[in-house]
Amino acid sequence: MRWSVLAAAVALAGSACRQGTGPAPLLHVVSEHSAGITTLTLVAAPGIRINARVKPALELPDGTVLRFDSPHQTPDSSYFTRPPTSSMAGAHRRAEGTLRASVCAADELVCRSVVLQL
Amino acid sequence: MFRASLPLLAALGAVGVGSVAPAPARPAPVWHNPSWLNADHALTLGELRGRVVLLNFWVFTCYNCTNTVPSLVDFDRRYRDRGLTLIGIHTPEFPPYAGEHDRGNLQRALEQYHIRYPNAQDNDRRTWDLYGIRFWPSFVLIDKRGNIRYEGAGEFHLNDRNYQLWQHRIEELLAE
């Protein structure tokens, strides 16, 4: 069951392609619950690639670090080609904590860090 | 928090991320990184007076950074004996649990990418902050008098336009 769509207040602001359309989220987290497990899926905005060499992480308030991963990556293992997921036991309507990811816009030549408070 | 600031993005947009921006000459900040690889001691800016210094801010988990390494290895091969010192400033993106802070992991990356120039671990991001860096990879070119002359960011490749721009700047400063 899909419960909630969280997050992502971060936009690729300043980019000319975004002008006039309002800020678009770079990343958001989709939370789903099934059979006692909550699955979190990290979804990137179109044109945004998530770095697979350093797995995105969700640092929970108790200090636990959940890493997002997916076997679906570019041949050189640089980027995810499908949204990476993580899971935690129990039913959670939403995840709380600090989300970290390294992302790269397809039309840029740099890596940048995204840190979001969920 | 989004670590890439909008003013900087706008500024880079004016020249294109990945290109070389001339910077007004200003003294390069003095770094104090204690942990170095490919060096028998902690290099200081002072001892490099009289040499041109190219700082490369990078991290081995960054695709754009490692794509640029062959060009940097080429610069080191071509220009070290002519007075260029290339220095990698290895700045992690993630907290230590990701492994980017680990000296052994960095050593393996240096070997994997055939990097022989000195690298400083910048695990506390002090040098990154000192130089006002926002992107991986970034570059700072320092002249023989210790002044920052050019700064830029973004991946480039052997003999492409930005490689040639950096090469031109290096040769310009070596000739001074």
Image (cartoon, rainbow, N blue to C red):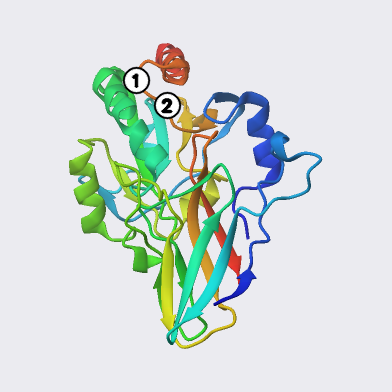
Does B44 sit left or right of B115 as displayed?
right
Front residue of B170/A50: it is A50
Instruction: Answer above or below: position of A17 versus B120.
Output: above
Tag 1, which chain? B
Tag shown at residue B156: 2
Q: Quadrant of residue A116?
A: bottom right
Tag shown at residue B167: none
The alpha-carbon separation of the residues under discs 1 and 2 comes to 7 Å
Front residue of B144/B9: it is B9
Front residue of B164/A66: it is A66
Tag 2, which chain? B
What count of labels does the image hold? 2
Q: Where residue B70 sits in the image (x, y, percent)? A: 29, 28
Instruction: Answer above or below: position of B171 versus B84.
Output: above
Does B106 sit left or right of A13 as displayed?
left
Residue at figure coordinates x 78%, y 44% from the top left: A21
Instruction: Answer above or below: position of B50 versus B11.
Output: above
Tag shown at residue B158: 1
Q: Is residue B45 visible?
A: no
Residue at figure coordinates x 50%, y 49% from the top left: A103
The quarter in which the N terminus of chain B is drawn is bottom right
